[in-house]
Amino acid sequence: MKNLQTGQTQQPEQAFRLKTYKKNELAMMYFPDVTKDAASRNFRRWIRQCPPMMKELEAMGYDKNRQYLLKAEVEVIVKHLGEPY
């Protein structure tokens, strides 16, 4: 896409894709300005502090110790937290 004011070509913003993510990868999308460890801590806290989301995740077999979030789990998280970025 070409910017009419500058004449430069712009890359379109990358849209969020619903897929399986590593937990720390998704955490960094929600908290891009902090370290990976801080992002992971904040992300875990957000999940714990939202009882309706936790209830849905636990009903589908969510394991807090698993490194990956399944696509269905990511869908529940995005439903409650909104899309990252």
Image (cartoon, helix red, strand yellow):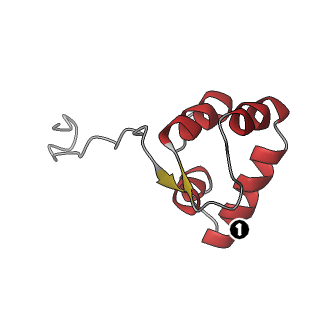
Q: Residue 4 at x, y = what percent?
A: 18, 34
Q: Residue at x 63, y 37 (%)?
A: 77
Q: Residue 40 at x, y = what percent?
A: 67, 62
Q: Tell me which corner region of the image, top left, top right, bottom left or bottom right, holds residue 5.
A: top left
Whether residue 78 sits left or right of residue 42 in the image: it is left
Q: Residue 3 at x, y = what percent?
A: 21, 38
Q: Residue at x 67, y 71 (%)?
A: 37
Q: Residue 84 at x, y = what percent?
A: 55, 42
- Nearer to us in this view, 65 or 22: 65
Q: Residue at x 72, y 31 (%)?
A: 56
Give the amino acid type for the residue marked by disc 1 in the picture.
Ala
Q: Tell me which corner region of the image, top left, top right, bottom left or bottom right, holds residue 41.
A: bottom right
Whether residue 64 sits left or right of residue 10 in the image: it is right
Q: Looking at the picture, does residue 29 appear above or below residue 41? A: above
Mark 1 lies on a secondary structure that is helix
Can residue 35 be seen here? The reply is: no
Residue under label 1, please give it: 38
- Nearer to us in this view, 46 or 34: 46
